[in-house]
Image (tube, coloured by chain):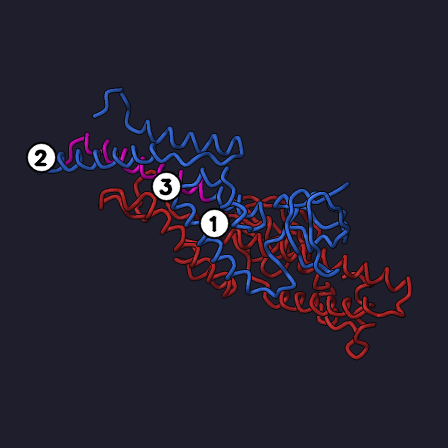
Amino acid sequence: MSTETRQFGDLATQLIMESRRSTQTDTLLKYNDSLVRLLIREQRDLERAAEALEAGMDELQGPPPALLIIQTAVSRNKRCLLAYHSHRIDRLRDLYWDVGGALPHILNNQGFRSKFSPHEVDYLRQYNSSLMEFRSEFSHELDITASITNPPKDLHVLVHVVKDCGVIQTELGSINFQKGQRFMVRRADIEHLIIQGYLEEVS
Amino acid sequence: MASASASASARARPASAAPILDTRQDDESPISQLTRHWINERHAPDILPAQEDLLASLLDHIRRQSDAVQLLRGEPSASEEEHIRIMLVQMEVERVKFIVRSYVRTRLFKIEKFARFIMTDATIQTRITTAERAHASRHAHLTDRHFHTSVLQSLPETQSHLDDTPIFMPPMITKPDDSRAVFVHALRDCPPIRFHEDLTLEMKRGHISLMPFSFIEQLLVRGDVELL
C-alpha cells in the first residue's frame, strides 16, 4: 500500500480533472500513462479485497457493508477510466477533422505525436481507413473531408506559399508550389493545403 | 439551384432541358429540399431518415454541371456574358457541395456518437444508408477494441466487460436523447399533438413552438414541420 493517504476514487478524480482541463483549454494533453496504470493497479487491489471479503462472508448475515463500498469504488473507477479514454478519442477525431483528414500531417508532427499513446496511434490509423472506405461511397466530385466551417464565398483565392509542398494538380494544370511564391488558384483545389498550413490566404 | 445554372445546363444539353428541376415535389426544388433536411438534421437529437434518392440526384446534377462547365470553358467563341454565367454556375456548384458535405458530416457525427446503440437497435438501422451502417459497425468495433486494449484487458476478469449496468449510473451506451427540446415550425396545418391525457396542441401553418423532439418526430418525418 502506498505511504500517502488516499481516499477511494482520488486517482479517478484526477483523471477526470485532466479531461476537464483538456476541454476547458481546448487542447489535447499528454496521455497520462502512469495515472492510468496506478488506477488499474488500484482496481486489482480492490478486486482482491472484495474476493477476501466474499470468501469470509457469513451466509446468514448477507454481504458485509465494506463489500458494497468496494464494489461502488470499482465501478466508479472503471467508469472514469473509460470516460477518460473516450474523451481522448473524441479529441483525436476532432484533431483529425481539423486538418481535413490528413493523417500523416498529425502523425509526423512531433508535438502531437508525443501526446498519443501507442494504442491511440493505432486508433487513428484504423479510424482513417474506416473513413476512407465511407468516403469512397461518394463520387470523386465531392470530397466529404473538405472544410465545413465557412461556406465558400469566392471561387478563386490568392495564396502565399509558406512551406514547399511540391507539385499539386489544379484546374490550371499542375503547379509546383515553392516557398515565397504567390498564386491565384481555385479554392477547392488547394483548400486542404491551407488547412494543413502549407499555404496562406492573402487578404 | 439558381436560374443561371439551370439555363447553362439547358444550354449544354439542349436535348434534356433542365433535367433535375422537373422532379420537384411540393414545388420545392431539390436544393431547397436538401437545405431543409440539412437544417433538420443539424437540430434533431436523433438521426433522421436518410435522403438517398435526393442526395443521389443532386450529386448526379453536380457532376453533369461540372462536366458542362468543363466543356464550355474550352469554348473559344464564348462571349464575356457567357463567361460570367459559367462562373456563377461554378460558384453555385461549390455552394451546393458545401451543403451536401455539411449534411453528410452531420449524420456521420451522430452515427459515430451512437455507433454502439445503432448496432443494437433495429429501428434506427432503417433510417440510415448501407454505407452509414457499415461505418457505424466499423466504428463500434474500433471503439470497443480501443477500450479493450487500453483499459479493459488489464483489469481483472470480472471487471473487463463493457456492458455492465451498475445501479445509480447512466447506461454505458450513448443513446439519442429524444426528450431534448427543439424549435418547430409548422409548414402546414398539423394533426393535434397529444402531450398527455388532457393537453393537446394543434399547430396551424406558420406556428412556431418549443417542445420535446419525441412529440414531433413523426410530423418531421412526414414533412409537416421543420426545425429551426
Mark 3 is surrounded, within 10 Å at the Cα level, by few (under 14), some (14 to 19) or many (20 or more) other residues, namely: some
Chain coloured blue: which letter?
A: A
Are the residues under marks 1 and 3 on the same chain? no
The total of numbered circles placed on residues is 3
Residue stretch rendered in magenta on the structure: A61-89
Which disc, if any, is residue B113?
1
- Callout 1: SS: helix
* Residue B110 at least partly seen: yes
Residue type, numbered disc 2? Gly
Residue type, numbered disc 3? Leu
Query: On the image, numbered disc 2 is attached to which residue?
Result: A56
Q: Magenta span has A133?
A: no
Mark 1 is surrounded, within 10 Å at the Cα level, by few (under 14), some (14 to 19) or many (20 or more) other residues, namely: some
Chain coloured red: which letter?
A: B
Q: Nearer the viewer, residue A118 or B83?
A: A118
Position of residue A90 relative to residue A2, above or below, is: below
| Label 1 – label 3 distance at C-alpha | 15 Å
Observer-side mark, 1 or 3, equals 3
* x and y, in percent, of residue A40 in the image: 28, 37
Position of residue A163 relative to residue A173, above or below, is: above
